[in-house]
Image (spheres, rainbow, N blue to C red):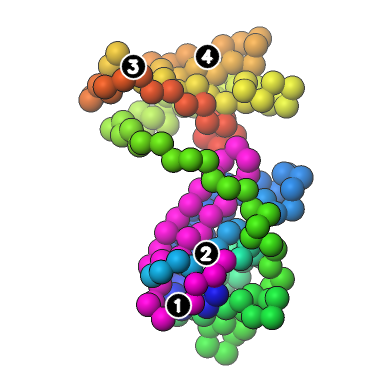
Amino acid sequence: MRLHVEREVLFPAVQRAIRAVDARVALPILAGLYLEVTGDRLVVAGASGELYVRAWIPVDLAAEEGRTVVPARFFFDLLRRLPSGPVEIALEEERVRVRQGDVEFRVSPMDPEDFPPFPEEVEAVSLPLAGERLERALRSVLFAASSSDTRPILKGVRWRAADGELVFVATDSHRLARRVLPLEVPVDAPVEAIPPASRLED
């Protein structure tokens, strides 16, 4: 794997993907960022078992295909300190080399085979909502979500879009919070999801 990419293109993708990385997760591979060059694009991905984030960015046509997993926090901090300009990333002799001008770092990668596969994608459903309305609605129910691992399902916030409404519900089995927002564009069929409350607070 070898590629050249502008730091100002790569860093935002890493910022998005690292949101899924949770240092508290026991599996070491989940402390890494998955990098894969396929064709003319680079996939940057993070996962925690609860949350999966992928970002795609273009790379030069001369890029060599391949994949690896790098320590997420180290890679993020490294890119954050680099100035704008082209960055070279290459997998060489069991090390990942990151170079910009006279600055060069080498990091030990992890086996990409150990990185968990992403869930199968389903057809996306768009729900147009003003950001402030969504934030207020979430904040009004997040307090009721459980923080206990005993019943993981209660650590999430249930979203359900149906009948012209988007309903948020959170509970820890002792308290319950519910908030309803009218949808500007009704959905054709009911849609439901339960994302982790801890991720919605970020």
Vertical position of residue 74 compared to residue 170: above or below:
below
**Mark toward the start of the polypeptide (1 vs 2):** 2
Disc 1/disc 4 C-alpha distance (Å): 50 Å
Q: Which residue shows up at 62% across the image and 83% down it?
A: 104
**Mark toward the start of the polypeptide (4 vs 2):** 2
Asked if residue 127 lies in the magenta stretch, the reply is no
Disc 3/disc 2 C-alpha distance (Å): 38 Å
Disc 4/disc 2 C-alpha distance (Å): 41 Å
Disc 3/disc 1 C-alpha distance (Å): 45 Å
Is residue 131 rendered to the left or right of residue 31? left
Residue 63: image tag: 1
> What amino acid is at disc 1?
Ala
**Mark toward the start of the polypeptide (3 vs 1):** 1
Question: Could you tell me if residue 84 is visible in this image?
Answer: no
Q: Is residue 96 or residue 128 the one in the foreground?
A: 96
Locate the N terminus and report the quarter of the image it occupies: bottom right
Q: Residue furthest right?
A: 26
> What amino acid is at disc 2?
Glu
Location of mark 3 (residue): 162
**Mark toward the start of the polypeptide (3 vs 2):** 2
Vertical position of residue 6 compared to residue 29: above or below:
below
Location of mark 2 (residue): 36
Location of mark 4 (residue): 177
Q: Residue furthest bottom?
A: 102
